[in-house]
Image: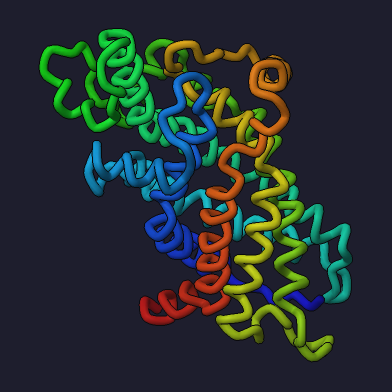
Amino acid sequence: MAEKKVSLPAKLINGGVAGLVGVTCVFPIDLAKTRLQNQQGARVYSGMLDCLAKTIKVEGYFGMYRGAAVNLTLVTPEKAIKLAANDVFRQKLSKDGKLALWGEILAGCGAGTCQVVVTTPMEMLKIQLQDAGRLAAQRTVTASASASAAGPTPSLVASRAAQPGTNTPPRPSATRITLELLKTRGLRGLYKGAGATLMRDVPFSMIYFPLFANLNAVGRTEDPHSNPQERAPFLQSFVAGCMAGSVAAVAVTPLDVIKTRLQTLQKGEGEDSYRGIIDCVQRVLKREGPSAFLKGATCRALVIAPLFGIAQGVYFLGVGEHVLGLLG
């Protein structure tokens, strides 16, 4: 597969724009995924739609976008690094304009490794903000159940009415969490779960990028002097990104569950804390069974598929090249 060099600034702009557009579209589903994956004790949500419906009812429409500011701020460098690094590695590993399958996998591995520098603190902060609503809802349900064992069934919606007089902690902010982590744990605090993040993102990229490249080249005429990816129409790039993203997302869902559990700082009543990856795997298997490692798999596929479909569509439309052309 031939590779055509594209300037690094253009790659960074493409990745950044793609990330911003994609995250804005799918963030509510990502919030549902985080809350479902962290659910251990009291069952607050029965599924993705139930989670979104209760979130809107209790926290309002914008409650679905808790943590979005962190994501929108850091997704630009994260996606830019991921997509640009993959392209750079592909160019370096190409021989005579061709890239073997092992080269595609290795390039994806390199891209996944590079992005962890930004992904880990971004996910760390985002998860705390996303999960805060679940913890508040769980406290309300637990308190209501304890206070009125013989009374009516506790309602999640009661959380709003119960605000006065409760000792609900203040709503967390990314700034407060960051300062607290830096003060108590140093820079390492922001990179808690970096190993699990690496363990998830490297296999994801090793699956995603080669699969996307081959899907995106389907139907392209073999021409050693052209780049099949560049000539692919927007719709093909979008569909290829969606398909490759959903396959890779579901494949690494167990690793995403582990990462989410390790990075969650505040636990609900009766929920386990973990000392590391192995301890997390053992405890989840013992308490919740193997099916727990697939929690949020549907949500994750619904998030990643359009996210990467949009990303690759924008990337191969050459938005960065057009922007640089206007500026230059």
| Circle count | 0
Q: Residue at x 43, y 17 (%)?
A: 268
Display colour scheme: rainbow
- The location of residue 40, given as percent across then percent down, is 53, 22
From the viewer's perspective, is residue 137 above or below residue 305? above
From the viewer's perspective, is residue 23 above or below residue 40? below
**Near-viewer residue (179 or 146):** 146
Q: Is residue 167 left or right of residue 65?
A: left
Q: Is residue 280 left or right of residue 150?
A: right
From the viewer's perspective, is residue 275 above or below residue 252? above
Q: Residue at x 74, y 73 (%)?
A: 215
Q: Is residue 305 left or right of residue 16?
A: right
**Near-viewer residue (243 or 213):** 243
Residue positioned most to the front: 150
The picture quadrant where one finds residue 132 is top left
Q: Residue at x 25, y 42 (%)?
A: 57
- The location of residue 208, given as percent across then percent down, is 70, 58
- The location of residue 141, given as percent across then percent down, is 33, 21
Q: Quadrant of the C terminus?
A: bottom left
Q: Residue at x 33, y 30 (%)?
A: 133
- The location of residue 123, given as percent across then percent down, is 49, 36
**Near-viewer residue (97 or 147):** 147
Q: Quadrant of the N terminus?
A: bottom right
